[in-house]
Amino acid sequence: EVHLVESGGGLVQPGRSLRLSCAASGFTFDDYGMYWVRQGPGKGLEWVSGISWNSGITGYADSVKGRFTISRDNAKSSLFLQMNSLRAEDTAVYYCAKGLWGSHFDYWGQGTLVTVSS
Amino acid sequence: QTVVTQEPSFSVSPGGTVTLTCGLSSGSVSTNYFPSWYQQTPGQAPRTLIYSTNTRSSGVPDRFSGSILGNKAALTITGAQADDESDYYCVLYMGSGIWVFGGGTKLTVL
């Protein structure tokens, strides 16, 4: 059974940094693209970033480009999101998802809450 | 910047049929965008319904179907049930490792 478990969320001040992690199990991790999708309070889903199976391709939403960095460790079946220069508008539940690269997101984690506030 | 459009809300009667759409602020949606659809109830993670335009995800009832209608992707629910009352999101693959979600449709079954 596929499991995606996010961690690393919490309360952080504007301008500071936070690193999210996603531990994956139940599938061959390096066969899949991995993604971060967020949902602000009372808002819709927003794709944040994606990384191909071998880290050869990464993509970012305009709203986070230059501030967030996605990475993965295939040996440890883990996905990461380094978030720098955080803003109040980055406050959201951050979901980790997997899927075939260039297609869709087939499994989702339960999310981790990031709150950016002074 | 590309905007993916969805109806903000829709209402359907129990047993009825409803079609939700997913469009582009500029241009037409085609299969090349690999449209996919997700269902989300409050406080829960999204659930994948449809991918690659019209392929149902494992375990999804066949009352959910996907298609291209005109210049938009579409999600049709046939024989709507009370527990279909949810938020529905589409997402399009723009190429070069970029995806964009629509704003979501809040579906009411009453």
Image: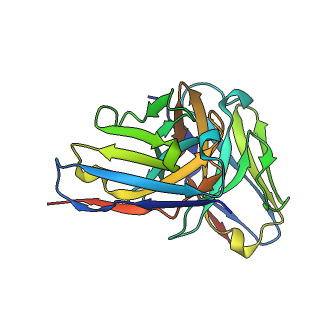
Q: Is residue B100 above or below residue B8?
A: above
Query: Quadrant of residue B21 in the image?
Result: top right
**Residue B110 visible to the viewer:** no
Q: Which of B90 and A80 is in front in this view?
A: A80
Q: Residue at x 47, y 43 (%)?
A: A73
Q: Report whether B15 appears left or right of B8.
A: right
**x and y percentages locating residue B46 in the rendered image:** 58, 59
Determine the image quadrant of residue B13.
bottom right
Tell me if I can see residue B73 in this picture: yes
Seen from the viewer's position, the closer of residues A10 and B6 is A10
Residue A68 position within the rendered picture, expressed as x and y whole percent measured from the top left: 33, 39
In the rendered view, would you say A57 is above or below B64? above
Q: How many labels does the image show?
A: 0
Residue B84, position as x, y percentages in the image:
70, 68
Q: In this view, does B102 lie above or below A54?
A: below
Image point 33% across, 61% down: which residue? A9
Residue B50, compared with residue B16, is above or below; it is above
Residue B25 horizontal side relative to residue B71, left or right: left
